[in-house]
Amino acid sequence: MEKHKDHKPHQCSECLKCFSRKGSLVAHMRVHTGDKPYQCTECLKCFSQKGSLVPHMRVHTGDKPYQCSECLKCFSKKSNLVRHVRVHTGDKPCQCSECLKCFGKKGNLVRHVRVHAGDKPYQCSECLKCFSKKSNLVAHMRVHTGDKPYHCSECLKCFSKKSSLVAHMRVHTGDKPYHCSECLKCFSDKNSLMRHMRVHTGDKPYQCSECLKCFSDKNSLMRHMRVHTGDKPYQCSECLKCFSDKNSLVRHMRVHTGDKPYACLECLKCFSNKNSLVKHVRVHTGDKPYQCSECLKCFSEKGSLVTHMRLHTEDKPYECSECLKCFKVKNYLVRHVRVHTGDKPYACSECLKCFSDKNSLVRHMRVHTGDKPYQCSECLKCFSDRNSLVRHVRVHTGDKPYQCSECLKCFSNKNSLVKHVRVHTGDKPYQCSECLKCFSNKNSLVKHVRVHTGDKPYQCSECLKCFSVKGSVVIHMRLHTGVKAYQCSECLKCFGRKTHLVRHTRKHSGDKTC
């Protein structure tokens, strides 16, 4: 019997393949001739073998005569049932000769082998891109056709790939089947888990070809590349400003909409972006995570640390294009430039006086409100600005940090030193517009101008007499109060004015100089 079984007397004249039966040779010859004598009466499709027509007819009749004994699922072809049964048995008879991986279907093995061979037999007719699987080509073609056949039953959103729909449905179901083995965080799709795992492994497989900087995900690399190319594909529909990434555009749009979706849980203050909220929360927590490596001073914001470090490095990267003066902070340069332009964008709503910087306006507003938020801890006296408090505290401490380089005399504030230096230089920058007389300080000019105007703003509360200088009214008040603040150290006689004491002292010294 074996001898008759192995005997194949019928040979194909085209490919020399041999067959044991003449009918098999006849059927085989149709491969070469292309003859398809068996036609479907329903759709007129033709087949080369009767055995192929019979299972095809079941597509029209719906007949599925082959049933799985395990799950009772039915199939129209016996070969489909055989492959299906392997799901239950776990049988994988098709093995890859390269990596020994096993598959339940021959088609899966064929596709897998292309991984090793690098074979990509399916080519896109539009862009000529090649694929190893036909299904991948079909999915890719939808990029060109725009076809999105998969619809979400919840929100009706459409997708070009079934896998994209499956991943999207988890937005509605909340399902997160992918777990991180390190921190147990869950994700709705496998790609998100893979990107997250790089946080633990530190893997950064995407490298910039320009500066060689590495990134953990492809999107970050793409956004970074725009730094080099200058590409800004996202444009604001309101002001037409362009941005290199979508998130920046989303944050910018809140400038127009006024939307502030991030609220502080402590004080309920709202912010337009998450970073601003994070920095604000540190006001409540007192957290200062950024530390100076030189003096160990801590800061709540990274920008503040960068600015502070310039005190140690003496770096002044911001230069004025007009006078070439340099500044440590960009805001200082912006305010300084207004000295040249004369721009004063901040106006007082009460008196309409304008200021070149916001802080000056805030201090000025206290003139109208009477607010004095800075209090001396020694005498409890209050001040409207911090600098005034600092100068006042020196009255208690006796600190005089400003020294004259000529006579080494010390002063508690810088303005006093500036005025004093004019004693040495003879500088008198303040000139009277009436008589052109010059003065070394502004107060002297103001008092002098009253000689021309006749203005006497200081009035005695007792007799209503008026004076042009405050010191004069103080001296005059002693006539009413009887106070004699100046005492002779020789005879202890008291005087209401210092000039009277000086004249009296000369009697003891014998000085008769007028």
Image: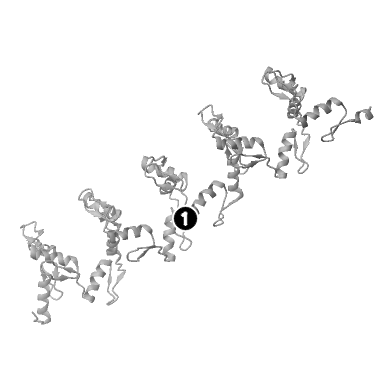
Give the amino acid at mark 1.
Tyr
Nearest the eye: 507 or 219: 219
Helix, strand or loop at disc 1?
Answer: strand
| Residue 493, x across and y down, in percent | 11, 72
Nearest the eye: 431 or 42: 42
Quadrant (top left/top right/bottom left/bottom right) for the C terminus: bottom left
| Residue 264, x across and y down, in percent | 41, 42
Does residue 270 appear anywhere in the picture?
Answer: no
| Residue 228, x across and y down, in percent | 50, 54
User: Which residue is identified by label 1?
Assistant: 290
Q: Is residue 468 above or below residue 425?
A: above
The part of the image, by quadrant, that contains residue 11 is top right
Does residue 349 appear anywhere in the picture?
Answer: yes
Q: Residue at x 45, y 63 (%)?
A: 295
Quadrant (top left/top right/bottom left/bottom right) for the N terminus: top right
Q: Is residue 3 above or below residue 284?
A: above
Q: Is residue 375 left or right of residue 123?
A: left
Q: Is residue 130 left or right of residue 316?
A: right
Nearest the eye: 484 or 156: 156
Q: Is residue 167 left or right of residue 441?
A: right
| Residue 508, x across and y down, in percent | 11, 79
Q: Is residue 312 above or below residue 237?
A: below
Q: Residues within 10 Å of mark 1 (few under 14, many from 20)?
A: some
Nearest the eye: 406 or 327: 327
